[in-house]
């Protein structure tokens, strides 16, 4: 069974604005960097509340996701290279259970304020990058917040950047 569609490649960086500028200049990719927001999650079964800031490339996809490092965090510590691969899935609980069955243990589970599971789950891999699973609601929320991959956008074939669709 295919796990889902690759949505983004995630990198944890100390200075998200500088990283966005450097990658934009080097790759010709635009980024939208968001404001700080709270993220409630369960790490190894223990509830944590962190303040995050992230940015997403505006190409049609897969995207580049930049996450600001969180001092002292086991999860969001900067390291060279790719931190995680984010996959869009139809059924988050089933996809997460499948990865666990395949030997990739659940590491981080996003949580709503009431403690119920939210739209993301991170699974550790022995081979390198963590696998993040995102449900459709989370993908749509990101598209709206960061103006990427929204339904009303189409790719310019020359630049692979989103352009407004034109009605006739």
Image: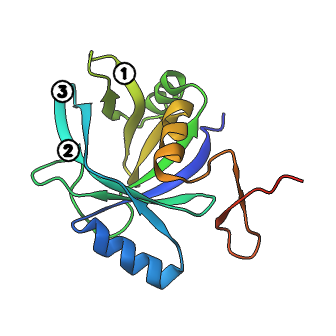
Residue 136 horizontal side relative to residue 45, left or right? right
Crowd class of label 2 (few under 14; some 14 to 19; many from 20; radius 10 Å): few
Q: Nearer the viewer, residue 58 or 68?
A: 58
Which secondary structure, mark 1? strand
How many marks are shown on the rendered structure? 3
Residue pictured at 44% horizontal, 45% vertical: 131
Residue at x 68%, y 68% (from the top left corner): 160
Which residue matches tag 1?
Answer: 117
Residue 77 horizontal side relative to residue 131, left or right: left
Q: Residue furthest bottom?
A: 26
Q: Nearer the viewer, residue 128 or 84?
A: 84
Residue 127, image x and y in percent?
41, 54
Residue at 17% in and 34% down: 49
Between 58 and 72, the one nearer to me in the picture: 58
Nearest to N terminus: mark 1 or mark 3:
3
Q: Is residue 53 left or right of residue 31?
A: left
Q: Secondary structure at mark 3?
A: strand
Please state which of the two labelled residues, at mark 2 or mark 3, is closer to the viewer: 2
Mark 2, residue position: 51
Report x, y in % for residue 54. Answer: 34, 54
**Numbered circle sitting on residue 47:** 3
Quadrant location of the N terminus in the rendered image: top right
Q: Are marks 2 and 3 in contact (CB under 8 Å)?
A: no
State the residue lying farthest toward the right: 168
Q: Quadrant of residue 18?
A: bottom left
Q: CA distance from mark 2 to mark 3?
A: 14 Å
């Amino acid at each position: 069974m295919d796990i889902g569609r690759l949505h983004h490649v995630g990198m944890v960086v100390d200075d998200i604005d500088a990283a966005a500028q450097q990658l934009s200049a080097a790759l010709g990719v635009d980024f939208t960097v968001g404001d700080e927001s709270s993220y409630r999650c369960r790490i190894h079964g223990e509830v944590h509340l962190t303040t995050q800031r992230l940015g997403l490339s505006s190409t049609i996809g897969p995207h580049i996701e930049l996450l600001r490092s969180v001092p002292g965090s086991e999860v969001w510590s900067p390291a060279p290279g790719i931190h995680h691969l984010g996959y869009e899935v139809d059924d988050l609980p089933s996809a997460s259970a499948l990865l666990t069955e395949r030997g990739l243990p659940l590491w981080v589970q996003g949580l709503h304020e009431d403690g119920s599971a939210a739209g993301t789950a991170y699974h550790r891999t022995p081979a390198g990058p963590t696998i993040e699973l995102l449900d459709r609601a989370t993908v749509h929320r990101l598209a709206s917040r960061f103006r990427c991959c929204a339904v009303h956008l189409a790719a310019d074939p020359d630049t692979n950047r989103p352009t407004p669709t034109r009605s006739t």
